[in-house]
Amino acid sequence: MRGLRGEDLAVKRIIRPIVQMILILSLGLVLAGCAGPVKVDLKELSGSTMFFQKDNQLEVVSVESFSEDYYNAEELKNQITAWLGEFNRSGDKVAFKDLVVADGIAKLDLKYKNSEAYESLNGIKTYYGTLAGAGQKGYDTNLFIGAVSAENPNKILTATAATDMDDVTVIILSQPIAIRTYEKIRFASTNVSIIDRQSAVATEDTSAAHPAVLILE
């Protein structure tokens, strides 16, 4: 495999979500449960955010500082679409949605067919699907035991209750990032800061060794 050129590295730097920055989430967006897809508004986002949409699709907005000295916005867009075209040769897995560059900040919006496509493109372990499916993918489903109720912080998920949850939708993340969900959040691990029932942040101590997990309604 050939080494990455400078422009390839720049494209990957923009595409990969920011995992070290402090995520600040605007609360101006009102989310109505299950009325439709989670609205993505690049203007109101100040940090990288994962939108968990219907049918296990992901939409991810990556926010990164951007210098016109290296690329202009049109060149960057062309590089990204070319790179995605190469990635999608085996099937349409990732779609380019938008790129906005303003005030030294680039905001890239990509839509993924599923969490497998996101993990394949970015190399970041991610799961979005049923609890039973997580076990089939090799995840330890005991990760969800002890998750805290989004509605009542004094209530935690017990092993007994989890046995009846094979078909519920879950999220497993190995990076700190803001989260918005199509369905309401029911339980979340202690390294998830819940903002409201459809908004949260996987905190800075989230990693592959210490994943953030959520259970949706």
Image: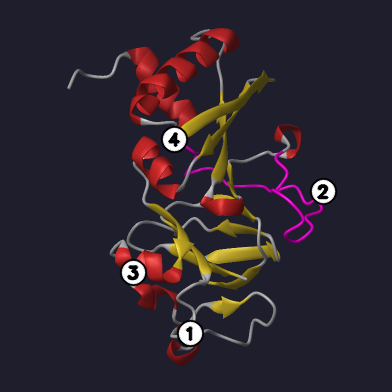
Provide the residue designation for mark 4.
93
Q: Which residue sits furthest left?
A: 1
SS of the residue at dot 1?
A: loop
Where residue 74 appears, x then y in whole percent? 58, 9
Alpha-carbon span between mark 2 and mark 4: 31 Å
- For marks 3 and 4, give the CA distance: 23 Å
- Residue at the image position 47 percent from the left and 82 percent from the top: 146
Extent of the magenta region: 17-40
Q: In the image shown, does 79 or 25 lie closer to the viewer?
A: 79
Q: Mark 1: which amino acid? A: Asp
| Quadrant that contains the C terminus | bottom right
First in residue order: circle 2 vs circle 3? 2
**Main secondary structure found in the magenta portion:** loop
- The residue furthest front is 91
The numbered mark at residue 164 is 1
Q: Is residue 195 magenta?
A: no
Spatial CA distance of label 2 from label 1 is 36 Å
User: Callout 4: 10 Å neighbours few (<14), some, many (20+)?
Assistant: many
Which residue bears the numbered disc 3? 135
Can residue 118 be seen at all in this image of the molecule? Answer: yes
| Front position among marks 2 and 1 | 1
As helix, strand or loop, the secondary structure at mark 3 comes to helix
| Residue beneath disc 2 | 28
Q: Nearer the viewer, residue 96 or 71?
A: 96
